[in-house]
Amino acid sequence: MLSNGLYNPDKIIDTFAKDMDKNKGKELSPKLCEDYQKVAMTLGLDTHLPVADSVIVEYRPFLINTIKEIEREYDCKTTIEKTLAESIASSYVRIIHYSKRLNEYILRETVTDKEKTDFYNLIGKELDRAHRQHNSSIMTLRQIKAPTLPFNVSAKTAFFAQNQQINNYDNQNEINERQ
């Protein structure tokens, strides 16, 4: 079923390019508009359309602009870097969205205390989740983009541990003998 190229990205783009050449100077047909949508989804990591469809319409331009700014700031070239940029931006948009909903709900006077408590619990959990995803994605992108430090060890025996002191007893013995 998939062998017919229905979901083959190269075929989708190639077919669209050929149809655009045939359609020069003419009004766009509904099929060509549909094919454009397929191409935009196929090139999703460049167009950011798939992730933009995951948020409400009013946040889409902000989301795409934020993704592009993150990609520029961190010089995102690889697929994993681009998906992390999208994850950072979409979690940030969710933080803004939930914060806005929380503020709108606080201003309501006709809501019972139980409804307020239930809503605060739900929004609080979603805000926490969005913050954790946001921070985790930022840290992951920073780790990926951090330069690697050259580290050479020349020893017969070496033990490395985090947050521990390494004593060189050979030098210490020489110091003690001099005293």
Image (cartoon, rainbow, N blue to C red):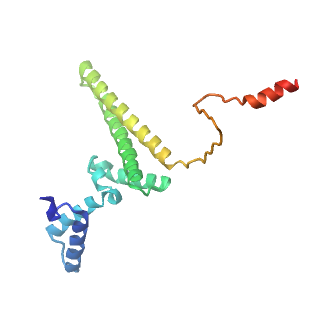
- Name the residue located 49 percent from the left edge and 44 percent from the top edge: 143
Which x, y percent locates residue 96? 37, 40
Is 132 positioned to the left or the right of 53 in the image?
right
For this orientation, the residue located farthest to the top is 113
- Name the residue located 53 percent from the left edge and 47 percent from the top edge: 146
Quadrant placement of the N terminus:
bottom left
- In which image quadrant can residue 107 be found? top left
Q: Could you say which is closer to the camera, residue 141 or residue 102? A: 141
**Image vertical order of residue 44 relative to residue 131, above or below:** below
Q: Could you say which is closer to the camera, residue 50 or residue 124? A: 50
Is 110 positioned to the left or the right of 46 in the image?
left
Circle count: 0
Which x, y percent locates residue 67? 40, 52
Q: Could you say which is closer to the camera, residue 45 or residue 117? A: 45
For this orientation, the residue located farthest to the front is 156
Quadrant placement of the C terminus:
top right
- Name the residue located 39 percent from the left edge and 42 percent from the top edge: 92
- Name the residue located 25 percent from the left edge and 67 percent from the top edge: 10
